[in-house]
Amino acid sequence: MLVLAELPVFTLGLWGLATLLTLLLLGRMVAFEQYREFPLFCTYLTVNLLQTAIGVLLYQGYGFTSSFSYQIAWTTQAFVVAARALAAAEVCYLVLGKYKGVWALATRILGFCGLLVLGLALYFGRNGYTVGITALEIALEACIATWVAGLFLFARYYAVRVLPVTGLLGLGIGLLSCFKILNDLVLERFARRYGDAWNHASLGAFAGILLIWIWALRKSSVETVPEPRLRPSMVYASLIPQVNRQLAELNEHLTQLWKLESPK
Amino acid sequence: MMSAGFFIIAVISALGLAGLLLWALRGASHRRTNEPGLAAFENAPHHLRNMAQIHQAMDRADLQYAAQKGGQRLADRLRRERRQVALLYLAAIRRDFEQSLRVARIVAVLSPEVSGSHEYERLRLSVVFRMRFYAIKLRLHMGTVAQPQILTLGQMVTSLALQMEETMARLGERAALAAELALQSER
């Protein structure tokens, strides 16, 4: 008898739905060769499916309560999070990679912010978690969400065009990470009280985000942003210091203006 | 068990990040093209040509003359209208300033090398500029700022735009950048 049959019907239904949606999305991406545009995102979906398959085999062989199953399940989760981090990096590159200067700046800043968030989450969460890997997962998810949010901020600031498909893939990855953080926090704090609810929320959120991704990739051909023609670096080097100097003078003038009183 | 403090901060941070994601993506995806387009290069600062009239409208002697000849009511009405002119002028300065900033961003986006310190400095200065700008606007509403001084601010913003134009022309890049932007606007 299949051990999965022991799961509550609702949990089983959600799990089946999420797996089917993942298969559908991956199948579509392969059929329409969209994996060429998003190879790392495709890898993430594949790793996710592999995790599901390993989970089924594990639980079938060792049951839900075995410590071996527990350890392997959390180890596969580390691979899934790492694959999602790579998919997030791919989205970042697709949005900003064509703009070499801004991309170099963004990788430095986002890399630093990501590591900072990772370090802070690990440091402040170090004593709180009975399961160390949960703290690591929260930290990694926070790092991914920070990258994606930072990417969109960069795109907004520099008025870089974000294609709907790339934007929605990034949004899904970022929201999933935020949701995982919330879910892990609730799991850690209220695991005993809301054991099943944690599973349902997690599967439901993943299914919802899969629908966003399916919607994003609904067209068979992926729109691309044409290569920009970069200007010589001399233009930047000549113009920008001058703009900054003028801005500083403007600010100085504003300060003086602020101090002046109107004549009565 | 984690502390309540960490739990609350982490939950707020996660919700904040989700909100930031939605807000930033909304702003970025609404720009179908590199927004400034040709307009940023082709529109000379508009308020420059109205400088003489605005200067006269803000002239203190003019107001005193109106008060002497037409009485206090006329002077008060004139003062209110002058404030409106000053506010409109301030809005025009802001637009020209934003336009110059947009051009600077385009140059950064199309540059193969970008200096982190320059970019940070410009971001910092533009944030400070905006904050002070709003503070002065507020004071102008309250009538506690010397209006003629705003003229100098306008001249400075105009000078920034003109200097950028000159530098781009000197480097022979004005037309190339404008063409690139026109191309992007059509996509």
Image (spheres, coloured by chain):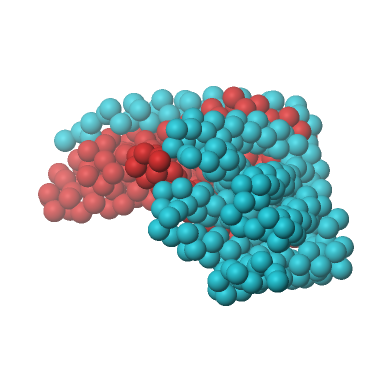
Q: Colour of chain B?
A: red
Q: Is residue B156 among the parts visible in the rendering? A: no
Q: Residue at x 16, y 35 (%)?
A: A264
The vertical placement of A28 against B180, above or below, is: below
Q: Which picture quadrant has residue B41?
A: top right
Q: Residue at x 16, y 45 (%)?
A: B67
Q: Is residue B73 among the parts visible in the rendering? A: yes
Residue A110 image offset from top left, x and y in percent: 61, 36
Quarter of the rendering occupied by the N terminus of chain B: top left
Q: Residue at x 49, y 63 (%)?
A: A196
> Looking at the image, which is closer to me, B118 or B40?
B118
Query: With A40 as the anchor, is B107 left or right in this view?
Result: left
> Looking at the image, which is closer to me, A22 or A263?
A22
Residue B105 image offset from top left, x and y in percent: 63, 40
Q: Which picture quadrant has residue B186?
A: bottom right
Query: With A213 as the anchor, is B119 left or right in this view?
Result: left
The chain whose colour is cyan is A
Quarter of the rendering occupied by the C terminus of chain B: bottom right
Query: With B85 as the anchor, is A151 left or right in this view?
Result: right
